[in-house]
Every structure is written in C-alpha cells, then in structure tokens.
Amino acid sequence: MSNNFSMEDLVSLCKRRGFIFPASEIYGGINGFWDYGPLGTELKNNLRDAWWHDTVHCPPIGLDGEPLSIVGIDSSIIQNPKVWEASGHVGGFNDPMVDCRETKSRYRADHLQVIANANGEGRMYAFIEGDEESEDRARKLLAKYEKVDALDDAYTTSLLTELPTDVFERVVGPDTKEVGTLTEPRQFSLMFDTTVGATGGDENKAYLRPETAQGIFLNFMNVVDTMRVKVPFGIAQIGKAFRNEVTPRNFIFRSREFEQMEIEWFCHEDEAQQWYEFWCEYRKNWWQKMGLSTENLQMRQHDSDELAHYAKEGYGTFDIEYKFPFTAPGFGELEGVTHRGNYDLSRHAEFSGKKINYFDQQKNERYTPHVIEPSAGLSRGTLALLCEAYTPDDRPSKVFMKFNPHVAPIKAAIFPLVNKNGMPEIATKLHEDMRKKHVVQYDAKQSIGKRYARMDEAGTPYCFVIDGETLEDNTITVRDRDTTTQERINVDQAVAYLDDKLNPV
C-alpha cells in the first residue's frame, strides 16, 4: 500500500467508480450506513467466497496432517431475546459516551482525548482519537486561546475518561468553541432494539444481533446430531451484524451495519492452546494470500484490560491488524482470534436448561468443548483490500487499483479498437466466450486511453484489444494493468490465457 494518498482520495474513487455509496444519499444519508455499488459488491463477494472456499469447501490441513472438519450454517439475525441475556450482551455490551449539549453530537468517551497546557490549567480541548482533522483543530485552538505554540511540547494529552469530573467544565468539545458543553460519561447500549409481532411493547422486544457467533453456539447440538462431526471441528458463518456505534467513522471501518466471517472451532480444553496458535498463524497468512502486504499486517495481543467478557483468562485475544491510512503509522483491527473457553456453550446450557456438551465415545468422556474463534470483518477486509490496491501513478488515470486478480471485481475487459471494420464482431465473440467463466466487461465507447483509465480505476487486471492486425493474423493485444506492458497472443488462446492468470493461488 502506498502512503501517498488520503482517505478522501480513496472515498472519492469509491464513489466515482461504483464501489461504495452513502446509504440513502438522496435524503442526506444516515450516519454509519453504506451501500455497496456494482464494483464494491463484486469485490466484497469475491473476498467472502474466497473465505468460504478456504474455510468450508477446502479447509486447511490441521495439526494431524489431515484436512480440518468445518461445516457452515446461516442463522437468523433476530433470535430469542434470552440469547443475548445468556451471552452477556444485554447487561454488558455498553460503551461510555458523552453528549455535547450545544451541537447535539455524541462521542465515545474512550475515543476522546484532551489536549491542555502543560501546567494543566486553563481550557482543555477534546478531539477524536485517530482523527487528524479533529486533532489539528484542537491543537490550533489550544495555541490560539491558551497562548501556547502547539508545535512545541508545551502541552499534555490524556484520555477524556481519565479526567476528574470536576474539570469537565473546562473542556471544549470537538465541534464547539464553548467550554462545559460535554456531559459526563455514561454507559450506552450498543444493541439495536426492535419488536416482534404487531402489538409492539416491551414484552415483544427483541434485538438485531451484534455478532454472528451466538447463532453458531445455539446450533452446536443440531450440528453434532445431524452432521456426524467429531471434536475437534468447526462451524463457519458469514452474515450481517449490527452495533449502534456512538461515533461511526473512518468510512466503512466503523459502521453500524457490517458483515462478519466467523469460525467457532470446538476442541478439547487440553488442545486449546495448540489450536489457538494454529489459527493465529493461519489467518494472518490467509490475509497475505488475499493480497495484503506483510509490512501492512501485524499481530497484537490484547492487554488484560481489553479482553472481552468471554475471553479465556491466560490465553486472551490476538488481533490481526492492518495499517489503514487513518491509523498509520499505527494499525487498526482487521480480525480477532480469541480463546472463548467454554463460556458461551455453558451459559446457553444454564439459561436454556438444555444439555449442550459433547460425548467422546473413544475416550468415554463427556465435556463442554472449548472454543477458538477467528472472527474477521468482511466489511473491514473489503476496506483493507481497497486501501492496499490504491496506487497513485503517472499514467493518465493518475491512479490504478492493484487488486490481487483473484478478488478483482472485473477480471478482464474486451475492447474493439474502433467500432467498425469487423472488430466489434470479434470482440463480442471473445466476450461471450470469456463471460461463461469469468466476470468480464465489453466496452466500445470513447478512446482506447479513456477505456484503459476506466479499467485501471476499477482494478481490472487485463484488457484484450481487437485491432487492425487481428483481421490480418488473428492476434490481439493483451495489456497488463500493473505494468501497462502489452503483448500479442492469438485470439483463440485468449480464454486459456486468462484462465492461466486467474488460477487459484
């Protein structure tokens, strides 16, 4: 990934080329929600399908040298409300928030930092952590009103949640110049409420799922009873989840509706550490296989104060993190690999009154399996692919999207050089042959340079051009997206050429 671009550059391209649009844009949008356009849908689906293939259809080789046993499910978005009581989400799925009385804006308190004079006196200026524009504004206000040169180290910063409550009256919010407009932090539920049935009311209250994992745990015994699986085995699911984020930001990185790709790997407690290490290594390598460069990925173990309520003490969670433009030089979470212990299965057994366990006939042992959870964000993964691919260049388009060909939305484009002299007929025939196996596009409009530019911004790896020579010797030009080099091949070999280039990695 090049660092020579801003998120504004990427968001502009995504809108211009049909990757991602603001949801309900004609009505002014709705914060935290996004629509995927034609190219974005293809990109996201390609990533989704690659994950499903490598997880369920062709899972990795396990510790014993044999392919892992993983099956897939698709559970309901809305479950019995007791599910979320058992899982701990209703009581514990909260974030501290503050409101601005003047602007009516709402912020996650643990995402706000304050900058102040080094002596701690005077006003304090709050900014959103990781938001360069917000931080720059706070520094300029500090320099202007507190008579401090913000370029010098004559200031201190701290988290808003670390401030004593009696100094809140001296804090200036991120979107105002007035002091004392921020409320004290209070807990805010991230669960989206809904009602089931026509009458409404609290007695019919339900929730949109905040994670896909619980649907897997609820179906553990169904899968064991119907699929003849033996521990260790996994259940995989891809689906939408919903979190009422206080401050959705950074494009699709933190949104209120998103998609997850999750595996719950069930194993004996004695083997949990081995499987935990296995999944950490495999999942990092998989993201590299999708085209994310090594220097932009890192593994980070959660500190003890970051652990979720279900994380097994002593094992915890490793995050696979990616260096997004808005986190650079730091990293942002892409996927988490967590040892959840047997927390979830035990809780559902307790709350439902049903037996949820596994009987090993060979060892004559009945137990509640432990769970290793590799949980990846499909939406964040799509954003990482977009960031990795964005490549500023001196070509006419000024930028091209360097997708791994296997996830590229369009695999190839077919152009007749001019829309006459028999060239459209040959191009149409080639397009008909290629589209049977691959997503390809036929384009006969505007100059060849503008057509190349469109395909560069779409991230199309190869362009096939039918020109005057084709009519003479049956050869066509193949242009490579990354290098812009061209070669001539026989038109009869074009389909095989593309097949070879797109062979699975």
Image (tube, rainbow, N blue to C red):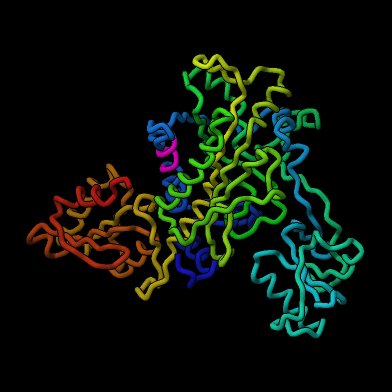
Left or right: residue 153 compared with residue 163:
left
The residue stretch that appears in magenta: 50-55
Report the label total.
Answer: 0
Magenta region, mostly helix, strand or loop? helix
Instruction: Please indicate whether residue 78 sits to the left or right of residue 124 in the image.
Output: left
Percent position of residue 102, x then y: 83, 65
Q: Is residue 35 visible?
A: no
Image point 78% across, 38% down: which residue? Answer: 91
Q: Residue at 22% across / 64% down in the picture? A: 417
Q: Is residue 52 magenta?
A: yes
What residue sits 65% from the left and 32% below the top? 78
Q: Is residue 381 left or right of residue 151?
A: left
Q: Nearer the viewer, residue 57 or 107?
A: 57
Name the residue nearer the viewer: 277 or 296: 277
Q: Work out whether residue 240 or residue 214 is closer to the camera in this orientation and state it.
A: 214
Q: Quadrant of residue 64?
A: top left
- Residue at x 42% of width, y 41% of height: 49
Residue 489 painted magenta: no
Please tell me whether residue 313 is drawn above or below residue 319 in the rendered image: above
Q: Residue furthest right?
A: 166
Residue 347 in view in this figure: yes
Position in image of residue 209 (x %, y %): 65, 37
Name the quarter where the N terminus is drawn: bottom left
Residue 504 in picture, x, y percent from top left: 31, 45
Going by the image, does 215 lie left or right of 438? right
In x, y percent, where is residue 479? 25, 63
Q: Is residue 51 above or below residue 226?
A: below
